[in-house]
Amino acid sequence: MIRFAAVAATGLLVLGSVAQDQPFLPQHLAPHEVPLIPAYKASRAAEARGITTPPPFAVRTMAEWEEVQTLVITWTSYTGILKQIVRAAVEECEVMIVCSNPSTVQSYLQNTQYGGPIDNLDNVTYLTAPFNSVWQRDYGSECIYQNEVDSLFLLDWIYNRPRPADDAMADAIATAKGITLFSTTTAPYDLVHTGGNFMADGFGTAFSSNLVLDENGPGGDYNTTIRDAAGVDLVMNQFMGITPGRYIKMSTLPYDGIHHIDMHMKLLDEETLLIGQYPIGQSDGPQMEQNIQAIMANHSSVFGTPYRIVRIPMPSSTGGAYPPSASYRTYANNIFINKTVLVPTYREQFDTTGLRILREALPGYRVVGIDCDNSDQNIISASGAIHCITKTIGVADPLLIRHQRLTDTYETAIPYTVEAYIRHRTGINGAEVFWSTDTLAGYSPVPMTAGPNNTWTAAIPAQPAGTLIYYYIHAAANSGKEQVRPIVAPQGWWRFRVLDINSGVADAQGPTIAEVFPNPTTDIIVVTVADAGQERIRISLRDALGREVLRIQDGSMHADQRAFADLSALSEGAYLLVVESAKGRSTTKLVKR
């Protein structure tokens, strides 16, 4: 049975066309759209949607890894990719497909292309509404909660493209879902923004590039009210609860034509940033590194500690080129859908490494790769990928759990305290920590004790040196709702090691090579460096005569950081990988096939 809703096109004819007449608009501004900007800007000044004044209550913006009730996509271009997204997402939540003809979409989902028919379409809802393009991330609505967990609302910005049907999409979705919509679409609270240039940690911290300042400043093409950085921060605080001083903005990248941060970075949790990395000195790599160093020097996570950085390679073209000479390939443009993560893929030699890094960083998640670089579904050439064409809507009654993971310790006598911030609108009935030293043997529960300000604590018993401890948190609300964190527990978990103080690791003088993979290799290698501290690290490859043939890294690294290199241009044979700092060096043999 087809479940659908229809939304009229009233008020969307300002530019003389509606929705499906140009289905292959790129994520960036198309040349023919430039003359449309003045009329679009005028239409935005005249049209208000939703509640255009700030919420009269405290607001929290949802993080992407929180529980999701609906995934929204727009059915127009790249339908092969969209079908693969639907196939994975229906296992996790409702999939709302905005389209012009539900019957046609359903037939496509049940045909033999792109993995065969999707037999289970019970979780698919069709919304017949006008649209201009596929880029749902950028024009779709953000999720905000009253008093952190009490009520769900949607939030709409002015879309930074002259695409009036897309700009009105948030209203259509809010109407279809029966969710109240707030919007920054009318002066004096108007704000131009785009979903691909925004990410939040769920607790008042957010990231964007300086594009948000440029588009709301004197040189903006779509704004009515001119705002400086403080003005932007004020609106983001009023409508989204972003804490003043915790809206982190970064310099735009030289070769990223759209300046959306989801093309090169991703918040994996409240304290972990996934960052794309180019070979040393190439493409946007130097500016990306400057941005990272600025974040590490000037900002901390919501826990008051430095962000954890997970590096992941930015793939090259088949000819080995990077932007601006090639498309902006990235693994950071992925999306959480409850227990599944959908990731754009490109070519096996890069994908093997990229998917491995994501699975290591997100244990327990189902990580699904979707090819975004093939001949008939080459979405990456249009400056976007999986995250860019999807938008999630959170659940109406989140059971919120925030926890800073425990780190490696030398403690063998005192139990390990686990603290979490836990809330639900009906209150918390109880919580516990489940821990194990062998997940195959199962977990042991430790009840958590309620403390002030929605904090709960428990203690994992002390363990001997050499023990690896896995754990997760479970909570139950007074309503009966239950939740775990990580959301994939017990298949996923946090873990930490009890180190041996006599092992000598603590007294190591220089950086050590923790891992090199794959080895042997035909092209890509990943070098993991341990005990790097804050030292300047140089990683190089030397031939049999001791000559440096490739400089892989030359700069500061943080503990357990990765560096990447493409060895495809080197001759086959054995090389010496050298990792060194002012305090010492480590070497290992590497074979290029």
Image (tube, rainbow, N blue to C red):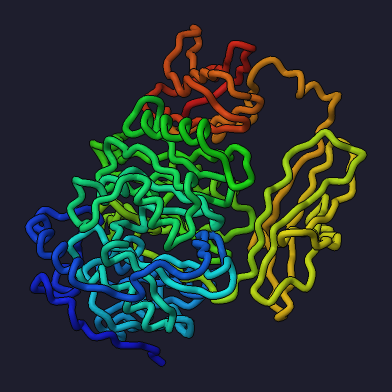
* Along the line of sight, the residue nearer the viewer: 501 or 142: 142
- Across and down, in percent, residue 457 comes to 80, 56
Is residue 114 at least partly visible in the picture? no
For this view, does 434 lie left or right of residue 95? right
Residue 18: image x %, image y %?
A: 15, 75
Relative height, residue 405 to residue 559 (above, below): below
User: In the visual, does 156 lie left or right of 471?
Assistant: left
Q: Residue furthest top?
A: 545
Location of residue 557 (image quadrant): top right
Q: Is residue 588 visible?
A: yes
Residue that appears at 52% across and 59% down: 63
Tell me the quarter of the image containing the N terminus: bottom left
> Measured along the vertical axis of the image, is residue 475 above or below residue 344?
below
Q: Residue at x 20, y 82 (%)?
A: 9
Q: Seen in the image, is 434 located left or right of residue 263?
A: right
Picture coordinates of residue 168, whole percent (x, y): 27, 73
